Amino acid sequence: MGRRRGLSLASAAVLCGLLLPIIVRAQAPRIPRRCQAPPKRKPETKLSIDSLQLEGAELPPGVSQARFASRLEQRARSGESRWLGRVRDAARAEWRDRGYFQTVVDVQPLEDRVQGGVRHVSLRIRIDTGPQYRIAEVRILNVNPGGKLVFPSERLRHLIPLGPGDIVNVEKAGQGVEAIDQLYASRGYIDLQATPDFQIDGQQNRISLFVMLDQGQQYRVGKIVALGFGPAGLSMLKSKIKSGDIFDWNAVRDFYSGYQWLMPARASVSDDRVTKNAKTGTVDLLLDFRACPKPAGPLSPAESAGRHQTIAQPKNQLRTAEPFD
C-alpha cells in the first residue's frame, strides 16, 4: 500500500512539473502593447506626381492642378504596390463627391521611376464624368420586415447630412452612416450593420439613398477585470463602468482620457481585451494598467539556480485583477 502511494505521489509530482509552465502561461496576461517594441519596418516609398495631363473634363472650380496632384498623393498614401489603383480611386472621388456618381477614370503612367525612396511619376488621366445627380429622398429602413427601430427614424434621418435636391455626395453619406453606427454603439448595439443603398433614376438624374439597418441585439457590461490598478483607480473605475450597465465604448474611452494621471505612461484602449458573448448579451472587459516590465538582463548563476522559484510570479500580478461588480 505504501509503495503504491509513493508511486502515485511521484507521478503527480512529474505531472505537476509538466503542467505548471502551461498553467502559468495560461494565467499570465499578455504584455501590454504599449510595452512592446514597435516592429521594424522598411521606409515606404513615397509617391510624387511630377506632372499630369487631364483629358475629358476640367478640374472642379477652385481646384488647381497642383492641388489636385497633392490630393491624389495624399489619398494614394504611398508609392508601394497597387498605387496606380489608389490614384484612380482618388481621382474618381473628386468628381463622385460632386454629384458625378458614375464617373469613369482611366490613369496611364507616362513616366515611372524610383529614386531615393520616392516614386516619381507623370500621369495622363482621362475623366468621363457622366451626368450630375441630385438626391431624390433619404430613408432609414429596417431590414427585418415589421421590426421596430430602436431610435425614431426622424432622429436617424437627421444624422445624414443630405436632403432632397442636394448634390449627391458619397463622403457625406458615409459620414451619416458612421454617425448612426456611433449612436447605436453608445446604447450597446455593437453588432449593428448599416448599409447604404443607392437607387438611381437615370431619366431624372436623381438618386434615392436608403440606409438599411440590421440592428442586432443590445449588450450590457459583464465581468470587469483591471490588471495592475491601485485602490484609487479601482474606485474611479467602479464609479464610471459597472457590471449590468449598457455597454458603451465611449464610457471606456472617456475613462482613459479623464484619468490618465492614475495610469502608466501610454496606457490606452488598445491594451484592453473585449470578449463578447451573444448568448448572454454581455461584454466582458479586461483593462490592462500594468507597468511595463524592465528589460531582462543576463542572469547571474544564483538567479539561474533559483529561477524555478519565480515561476509563479505572474499570480502576484493578478492580485488587483479580481472581477468586481
Image (spheres, rainbow, N blue to C red):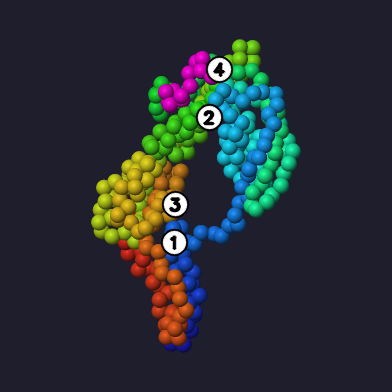
Which is more N-terminal, label 3 or label 2? Answer: 2
| Residue 162, magenta (yes or no) | yes
Question: From the viewer's perspective, is the residue at label 4 or at label 3 nearer?
Answer: 4
- Give neighbour class at mark 3: few <14, some 14-19, many 20+ (Cα, 10 Å): few
Which is more N-terminal, label 4 or label 1? Answer: 1
> Mark number for residue 270?
3
Q: Position of residue 74 (x, y in %)?
A: 57, 40
Q: Work out how far the residue at label 2 is from the one at label 3, CA to CA, in angstroms.
A: 27 Å
Left or right of residue 320: residue 190: right
Residue identifier under label 4: 134
| Residue 209, magenta (yes or no) | no
- Give neighbour class at mark 4: few <14, some 14-19, many 20+ (Cα, 10 Å): many
What kind of residue is marked 3? Ser
Q: Position of residue 45 (x, y in %)?
A: 63, 50
The structure residue drawn at horizontal position 56% and vertical position 23%, both measured from the top left corner, is 61
Which stretch did the figure color magenta? 156-167
